[in-house]
Amino acid sequence: MSFIDAIIHADEQLLIYLNNFGSEPYDVFWLQITKPLNWLPLFLFWLFLLIKKFTWKQGMFLFLFICIMAGLSDVLVNIIKHSFQRPRPCWQVGVMEQIRSLKCSKSYSFVSGHATTSMAVTTFIYLLFKDKFKWTVLFYIYPLLFAYSRIYMGKHYPADILCGYTLGVIEAILYLKLAKYLMNKWFDKNLL
């Protein structure tokens, strides 16, 4: 077995282990967790924090910037998915027979868009507020639950999630640099 095959096998075994914690009584909960719109109260809270820390106009600019970042993140994820073409666990022969699967998608698995985008947005927000609010680390509950829902539903392998998290952190750091540049240029003072 090659090194890559060993990693893939370990990834499949970890998925099977984590996925099999699921049971029917919890399905409704995880089906709700995986829907981005169900996180709208958190997004509105973040908008409130942005407006509170900055002016209304600056807060709205950052919020729209974050929305654009999320959209571009989704585009990048889809390019990666079509480049790697890794089947989802719920379609992978040898794996699908050993996992619980809820609403399997036909698109590819690697990398997880849920993990990438949720981590990018959360890290961006965290970096904006980490010095002002000590509890902002709690925002990371969102990408942890959001991404685990994908394992629970049999849609992603753990490596899809971990690579998505890594990509999301990199995106957040790069986009924050761009946001700082634009904010300082357009709003005429050092805001970030």
Image (cartoon, rainbow, N blue to C red):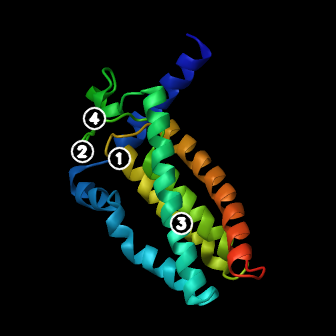
96 on left or right of 175? left
Residue 153, image x, y percentages: 31, 45
Residue drawn at point x = 63 percent, y = 69 percent? 126
Q: Is residue 110 visible?
A: no
Distance between mark 3 and mark 2 Cα atoms:
30 Å
Q: Residues within 10 Å of mark 4 (few under 14, many from 20)?
A: few
Neighbour class for label 1 at 10 Å: few (<14), some, many (≥20)? many
Query: Which type of secondary structure does the marked residue at label 3 adopt?
Result: helix
Amino acid type of the residue that numbered disc 4 sits on in the rendered structure: Lys
Query: Comparing marks 1 and 4, which lies closer to the viewer?
Result: 4
Element marked by disc 4: loop
Residue bearing the label numbered 1: 152
Residue 36 location, x and y as percent?
36, 62
Q: Please, is residue 25 above or below residue 150 in the view?
A: below
Cα–Cα span, label 4 and label 2: 12 Å
Q: Is residue 61 visible?
A: yes
Report the disc number at residue 102.
Answer: 2
